[in-house]
Image (spheres, helix red, strand yellow):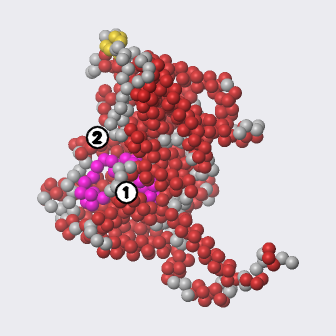
Amino acid sequence: MPFIQDPGLVDEAKKAGWLTRLYRRRGLSGPVAAVLLLGFLLTPLLPGKFPTIVATEILIVGLFALSFNLIYGYMGQISFGHGAFFGLGAYATALLLRYFQMSAGEVSYFGFFLAILAALPVSAFGSLIVGFFCIRLTGIYFAMLSLAFGELLFYIVFSWYSFTKGDDGIQGLMPPPFFQNSTHYYYFTLAIVVMAALLLWRITESPFGYTLRMLRDNRNRAAFLGINARRVMLMNFVTAGIFAGLAGALWGPFQRSVSPALLGWAESGKAVFMTLIGGAYFLVGPMAGSIIYTGLNAYVTRYTVFWPLTIGLIILLIVLFVPGGLLSVIDQRISRRGTERESRERIPPEAAPGPENEA
Amino acid sequence: MPDFGSLLIQLFSGLSRAMMLFLLSSGLSLIFGVMNILNFAHATLWLVAAYLTYTFFQILSNFLANEALVLVAAIVLATGIMFFLGLAIERFLVRRMYPRELPEQLLLTFALILIFSDLIKLFWGVENRRIVLPIEPLEVLGSFVNPYFFVIIAAGCGIALGLWWFLHRTRYGKIVRAAVFSRDMVSALGIRIPVIYAGVFGLGVGLAALTAGIFLPIMPLSLGIDMDLIVQCFSVVVIGGFGSILGTFIASLIVGIVYSFSILFWPDGALAIIFIILVAVLILRPWGLFGTEMRF
């Protein structure tokens, strides 16, 4: 740290609050995550069930967006087929839940957790197959192949009526009685999402995570350093697919139904938007983006049917003027203020050079 | 096995669809070739043009009796407006995206899809629209065919020839092809690149608008058909190879005819077959049939 020799500033640093120390040690994601966690914990205190339900949705699609950002922000590729793994996880859970419901009449707690866990290998397998082909390409070709695979998976689910009930979707999914209460399910979701986010943090702040960043920034150089780009990219793709499947698993019991649209590119597009709004280069960026996107969606659709126009205009403005997302704006403001404060303290006002001091 | 009559109809339908895909994809391929921007919103702008042409047709029908004349006038008006809209979009939105990364460029055009789709919903509502021209069905080989198909195929070939002539025989077209090859050299020769880019984008959008107008008599308009179409256009451009008109032409034939015949056997999955072809091409030969070979 540059100013450590100046004793005055060391005292200043020691006086900084815990939030500032978290910022200095962990970057912007640290304090933002802390603030968000506090907000999420307190949400059910708001009146009515609507805030809790919206917050559950924010958490689930936020997890989906976090998984997408592994591919986009950390690996540098854009995938329009990521919704397919979300949908695969959702269907895996939904099919098992329906099986339990039909054979036993009610879902036991063991069955419920088993159904959620079942989503993980299914989405892992799906993303392994898709990823195997996608990682051989980059840029626009990666985007298009992922889109094509996503749509293919959508069509398989859509057409396989005997197994997935096609366009009708799977209705009437009920979690066990304790989780049918929206507040209980909300805290359950929050616990899972927090654990997943901690896992993601460990993954991205590991040598693996930094290898990903190198693949994003300069793939050739990574290859020269002996890194097997395809293996790392495939591992990352599958990891992202697993987390997306976990989010999908939570979605089914929440909405009490699943439909093939969850696998389509519209759903994938949502993850892209949320990541863009929040900021792709921050760990919690996609979650912040989810709060804004899902929250806006929940409240705007009460007043107007023209939600696509609204979100389209917002995306347009963000892409044009703030492509780093909301968190990048906050980050710039904070570092600017910090630098200004430090430089103001170093230079006494009388000796400051300026036009008025010139002889 | 469906009878010969319905096979013939599907063939014509496939050919006309192939023609539409070719005209639309040419614009897409041109824009990508010159400016390296993949215009996701190409089909949505096409739909805007179609609705616009429909409205002009309705208005002008009150003044002129000859439907063909009304249609031509409506097409000319709509194409002109869309050309200028294309210029405006390039000047104010797309131009800022040239120095940016690919994902941001894709997101810009994706946002345009959302905006224009909803604008269509705002101005024209959700009901389907169609225009009807009084044309007698023609009997060909035992089944009835709409003779307008021949008009479409002729018009499509005419436009394709016109595009080729423009790119290969006019000065402006040669500048455009040179800009695809080397933007910097063209700029160094004193030709203003921003003007070229704006022109190409406007040309692409105008071409889409022209296509929309020509196809209006045989195509009922509804919201959401642009999504189906843009995916097929991407498939065409990828299968044919970016930057190759011949590739686009062959790929349009493939996609158009495969799609039409799939509707006979597996209506819901016609698009899925196109996706399978797309996946196969991207895995085995990503640069398409006629594109320049690339290493990954």
The 10 Å Cα crowd at callout 2, few under 14, some 14 to 19, many 20 or more, is some
Q: Give the range drawn in magenta.
A: A251-275
Q: Which residue does the numbered mark 2 point to in the structure image? A: A159
* Disc 1 residue type (three-letter): Val
Cα–Cα span, label 2 and label 1: 33 Å
Residue B266 image point, x, y percent: 30, 32
Q: Tag 1, which secondary structure?
A: helix
Name which residue lies at 39% across and 15% down.
B147
The 10 Å Cα crowd at callout 1, few under 14, some 14 to 19, many 20 or more, is some
Q: Which residue does the numbered mark 1 point to in the structure image? A: A300
Is B250 colored magenta in this rendering?
no
Q: Tag 2, which secondary structure?
A: helix
Magenta residues, dominant SS class: helix
Residue reaching furthest right? A359
Q: Is residue A60 left or right of residue A337?
A: left
Name which residue lies at 54% across and 65% down.
A328
Name which residue lies at 44% across and 25% down.
B60
Name which residue lies at 57% across and 70% down.
A333
The C terminus of chain B lies in quadrant: top right
* Disc 2 residue type (three-letter): Ser
Q: Is residue B11 visible?
A: no
Viewer-side residue, B112 vs B23: B112
Q: Which chain carries label 2?
A: A
Q: Considering only order in the chain, which callout, 1 or 2, is on the residue closer to the N terminus?
A: 2
The N terminus of chain B lies in quadrant: top left
